[in-house]
Image (spheres, coloured by chain):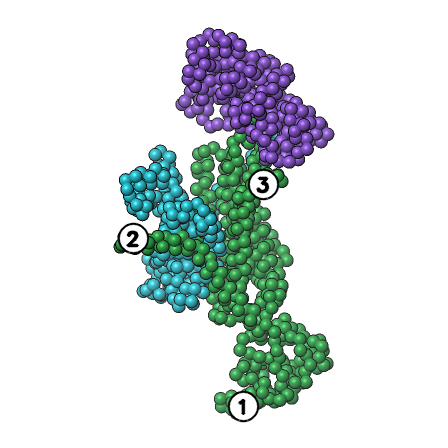
């Protein structure tokens, strides 16, 4: 599904990613772990070209999604981003109503049919396990929801445009444990339909939700393995040290 | 001991300075209103003069407008004012010589009052405009008209501004109030799309190099003195407007609005740009990640998010336009007439003050009327400034 | 229309608008420069107006504007800087400061003609100064007060808190700390505010109409209680009510150019100085 070949990435003169090649399978959950500043978020943001927004960045290597080089000049960025949903570290709903937040992606992609939009909003809110909690508040501001609800709203918002891949950048780091577990359950359900890549700080979370795990450090991919193997018996000693909390 | 004292002095001095802006505003309002509110105690005829009629005359109800119409020969018969069917005879001081010679009036005009009384008694239709010192009020057959004071409704809803007319000057400010609003609002209509466009360009599109170049340019535009804008408007813009629209004169409301639009641009641009730059990066990224184009992100997320900042920019732009004096004075033609079209000359409140205060006798009704206009202007801008502050502080997500 | 095309369309207009803004500035400045340069020579800058102001120079107007700049600064700078010291260093962050800040903002938004009216009522009539340099300077001083207060406040706030605590740790009093540490640090930034207010003072016309400005004076002012000519008012007179408007047009162009150069010189200096200083701050 996602294949990267010899990726090097620079912020100005600082090299943030060093020669990374890896493959992520369809309908799996892949977790990226590693200490702060190791490049895992930067790597994730390559897949929907979010790093394009930052001035003075440079990319070497290839990034193929469904076999197509997404950095090719012929690529339509809007269409690419529509196909690859993203959930951010902090819940970032728009200053609009709950309904409009979910409908946003449909509207910007040219859908005007009111009935279709209404159905789709309900469907995705259900898929995000949020509908029962917010069905009376659809026209209220999204800021009136709790932090955990806001984050699930952001997931629903991403799902509404029917992406095939879902990128999650530490989606539970700003949430309390109960909200976190709801998000994790949701990830588990979504796996059936979507390919999910999740960046996380929290090792237990990676162990709970992911099928495969990549361990990053100082811009390098140290180890990429099945999650079970990674947490029980990693190939490299440095991975073992990190996972057992000797540094972080 | 000495040190303590000097510390105390310095601290009091600092507190005083801190409070000075507030004190100044207080003083400004006190002085403007002290001078301005005296206006409503002024009689509707020129100060120092009275009006006299024949005592048989039954007409009671006078105001400045009617007096003016009488002296302008627009009302010529007392029946029009509800009196007898007698033709009105206007009498000013010069007319006394039609009746009496210099000798008859006495060397020091000591018999003038008496003779005036005789004339008034003899002429049934007369209305005489006489200075107090020669008042014939004590003689029989003469009636002094009681003229009411100028009322606020004369001032705010009167359509004629003729502050130097005799015997009854008119102080209707409606043409100026409307003129000010017209010129300012049209200016904002021009400036808003242009200013927002540039603000969007600066905050979202411009590369750092161009931004660094464009920002000082906009500050320079804000720095050009208003009298220079006025001069430019007068020698370049006014003839251009005249030629383009084939008008008799180029100094019109439109010319004023164009110049004001240019002058309001820097305010609008810099405040709107700041507001848009304050939109959280996360909002922008969320929108782009859903497949929205940059432009969709701008008008669906960034502009709604910075709505309060943009509104504040508009309000302050209007404030700047309403208060602007010199440029408007030089390019709008200054006719104190009710504005009917953008292509007519108009006059604004500040321009009126600037043009007339120098000639208004200190303490007179005209002088006080101008201070009252100043007080109105002061209140309007104070209100605008407070409104802008409240708007920009408000973050209301509900009604977006 | 597809959304990419719409974007292209919209962005085209925003670029166009930005070019228009630059165009407007170039048009105004270019027009004044081209016409003004023909007139400007040494005699124009140093001579008295002659022949009903259709010939000669604008020396008295330049001198008058200089007096007004100096006069208003003497009044506004100490007051403004002290006000800023009070709000930043003493008043904390409570209601008092918010009120003072609101008043400063309001003062900044009052139209200049209202300052003119007030100056006339208080300084010219109330205090009996008559039309004079001192009345004009005080009026202009009030006008620039918000600029000086605001820039000084920002300058003082930009001084790192550690400088203050460092000074206190050495046993210095609050006043000593402000005088020896905070103020010297903030001085360059305060200076930009002062330069900016010079630019403002030299360009304002409405406040001096009734407080100082003279249509024509045969000699230079000899005390702070005499009337003076000033560049912006002189331009207004030449443009609208000279003895022979057509004949004095070249004089008007020259005056406009001198005025614009003075105002924009100070304006640009302040802008560049501020840019330079904020860069230095970042490097620290």
Residue found farthest to the front: B1
Q: Are marks 2 and 1 in contact (CB under 8 Å)?
A: no
For the point 50% across and 57% down, the residue is B325
Is residue C127 at least partly visible in the picture? yes
* Position above or below: C269 against A176: below
Of badges 1 and 3, nearer the viewer stands: 3
According to the image, label 1 marks what residue?
Answer: B111
The colour chain B appears in is green
Image quadrant in which the C terminus of chain A is located: top left
Chain letter for the residue marked with disc 3 in the picture: B
Q: Nearer the viewer, residue C254 or B150?
A: B150
Against C43, residue B91 (above or below) is below
Q: Secondary structure at mark 1?
A: loop
Q: Position of residue C97 (x, y in %)?
A: 44, 48
Judging from the image, mark 1 belongs to the subunit labelled B
Numbered label tally: 3
Q: Secondary structure at mark 2?
A: helix
The residue under label 2 is B4
Cα distance, mark 2 to mark 1?
76 Å
Task: Residue under label 3, please give it.
Answer: B396
Q: Residues within 10 Å of mark 1 (few under 14, many from 20)?
A: some
Q: Give the mark nearer the N terminus: 1 vs 3.
A: 1
In the image, which lettered chain appears cyan? C
**Which label lies toward us, 3 or 2?**
2
Mark 3: give few (<14), some (14-19) or many (20+) Cα within 10 Å. few
Same chain? Circles 2 and 1: yes
- What's the CA distance linking mark 1 and mark 3? 78 Å
**Left of A180 or right of it: where is A118?**
right
Q: Is residue B387 above or below residue C7?
A: below
Left or right, C48 with respect to A38, comes to left
**Chain letter for the part of the structure drawn in purple:** A
């Amino acid at each position: 599904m996602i294949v990267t070949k010899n990726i090097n990435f620079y912020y100005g003169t600082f090299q943030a990613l060093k020669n990374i090649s890896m493959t992520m399978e369809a309908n799996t959950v892949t977790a990226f772990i590693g200490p702060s500043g190791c490049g895992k978020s930067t790597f994730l943001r390559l897949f929907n070209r979010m790093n394009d927004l930052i001035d003075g960045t440079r990319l070497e290597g290839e990034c193929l999604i469904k076999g197509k080089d997404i950095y090719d000049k012929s690529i339509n960025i809007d269409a690419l981003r529509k196909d690859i949903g993203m959930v951010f570290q902090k819940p970032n709903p728009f200053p609009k109503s709950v309904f409009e937040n979910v409908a946003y992606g449909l509207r910007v992609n040219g859908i005007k049919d009111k009935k279709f939009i209404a159905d789709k909003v309900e469907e995705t809110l259900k898929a995000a396990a949020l509908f029962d909690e917010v069905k009376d508040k659809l026209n209220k501001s999204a800021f009136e929801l709790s932090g955990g609800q806001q984050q699930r709203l952001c997931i629903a918002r991403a799902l509404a445009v029917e992406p095939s891949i879902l990128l999650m950048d530490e989606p539970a780091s700003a949430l309390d444990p109960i909200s976190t577990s709801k998000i994790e359950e949701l990830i588990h359900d979504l796996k059936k339909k979507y390919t999910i890549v999740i960046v996380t700080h929290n090792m237990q979370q990676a162990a709970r939700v992911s099928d495969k795990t990549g361990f990053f450090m100082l811009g390098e991919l140290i180890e990429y393995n099945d999650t079970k193997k990674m947490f029980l018996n990693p190939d490299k000693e440095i991975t073992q040290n990190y996972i057992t909390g000797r540094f972080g | 001991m000495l040190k303590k004292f000097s510390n105390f002095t310095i601290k009091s001095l600092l507190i005083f300075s801190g409070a000075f802006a507030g004190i100044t505003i207080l003083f400004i309002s006190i002085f403007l209103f002290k001078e301005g509110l005296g206006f409503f105690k002024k009689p509707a005829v020129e100060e120092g003069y009275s009006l006299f009629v024949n005592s048989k005359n039954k007409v009671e109800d006078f105001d400045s407008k009617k007096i003016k119409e009488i002296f302008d020969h627009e009302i010529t018969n007392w029946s029009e004012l509800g009196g007898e069917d007698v033709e009105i005879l206007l009498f000013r001081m010069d007319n006394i010589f039609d009746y009496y010679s210099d000798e008859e009036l006495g060397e020091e005009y000591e018999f003038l009052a008496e003779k005036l009384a005789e004339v008034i008694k003899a002429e049934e239709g007369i209305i005489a405009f006489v200075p107090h010192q020669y008042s014939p009020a004590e003689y029989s057959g003469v009636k002094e008209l009681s003229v009411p004071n100028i009322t606020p409704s004369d001032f705010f809803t009167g359509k004629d501004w003729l502050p130097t007319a005799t015997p009854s000057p008119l102080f209707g400010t409606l043409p100026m109030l409307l003129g000010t609003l017209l010129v300012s609002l049209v200016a904002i209509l021009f400036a808003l799309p242009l200013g927002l466009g540039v603000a969007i360009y600066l905050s979202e599109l411009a590369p750092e190099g161009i931004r660094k170049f464009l920002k000082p340019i906009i500050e320079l535009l804000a720095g050009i003195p208003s009298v220079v804008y006025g001069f430019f408007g007068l020698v370049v813009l006014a003839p251009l407007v005249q030629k383009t629209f084939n008008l008799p004169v180029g100094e019109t409301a439109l010319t004023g609005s164009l110049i004001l639009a240019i002058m309001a641009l820097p305010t609008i641009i810099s405040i709107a740009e700041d507001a848009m730059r304050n939109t959280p990066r996360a909002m922008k990224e969320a929108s782009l990640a859903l497949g929205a184009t940059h432009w969709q992100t701008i008008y669906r997320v960034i502009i709604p998010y910075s709505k309060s900042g943009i509104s504040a920019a508009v309000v302050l732009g209007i404030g700047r336009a309403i208060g602007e004096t010199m440029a408007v004075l030089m390019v709008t033609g200054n006719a104190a007439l009710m504005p009917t079209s953008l292509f007519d000359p108009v006059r604004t409140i500040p321009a009126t003050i600037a043009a007339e205060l120098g000639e208004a006798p200190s303490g007179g009704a005209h002088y006080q009327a101008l201070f009252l206009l100043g007080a109105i202007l002061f209140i309007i801008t104070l209100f605008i400034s407070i409104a802008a502050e409240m708007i920009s502080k408000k973050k209301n997500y509900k009604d977006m | 229309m597809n959304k990419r095309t719409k974007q292209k369309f919209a962005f085209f207009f925003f670029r166009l608008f930005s070019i228009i803004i630059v165009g407007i500035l170039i048009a105004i400045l270019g027009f004044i420069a081209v016409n003004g340069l023909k007139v400007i020579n040494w005699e124009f800058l140093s001579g008295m107006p002659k022949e009903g102001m259709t010939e000669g120079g604008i020396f008295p107007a330049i001198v008058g504007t200089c007096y007004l700049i100096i006069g208003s600064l003497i009044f506004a700078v100490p007051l403004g800087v002290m006000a800023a010291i009070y709000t930043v260093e003493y008043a904390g962050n409570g209601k008092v400061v918010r009120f003072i800040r609101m008043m400063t903002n309001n003062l900044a938004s009052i139209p200049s003609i209202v300052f003119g009216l007030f100056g006339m009522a208080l300084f010219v009539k109330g205090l009996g100064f008559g039309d004079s340099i001192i009345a004009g300077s005080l009026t202009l001083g009030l006008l620039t007060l918000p600029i000086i207060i605001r820039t000084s406040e920002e300058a003082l706030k930009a001084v790192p808190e550690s400088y203050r605590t460092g000074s206190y740790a050495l046993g210095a009093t609050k006043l000593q700390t402000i005088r020896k540490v905070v103020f010297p640090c903030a001085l360059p930034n305060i200076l930009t505010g002062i330069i900016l207010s010079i630019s403002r003072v030299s360009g304002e016309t409405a406040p001096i109409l009734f407080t100082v400005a003279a249509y024509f004076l045969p000699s230079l002012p000899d005390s702070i209680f005499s009337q003076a000519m000033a560049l912006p008012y002189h331009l207004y007179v030449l443009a609208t009510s000279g003895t022979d408007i057509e004949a004095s047009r070249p004089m008007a162009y020259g005056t406009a150019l001198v005025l614009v150069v003075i105002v924009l010189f100070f304006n640009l200096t302040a802008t560049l100085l501020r840019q330079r200083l904020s860069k230095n701050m970042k490097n620290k």
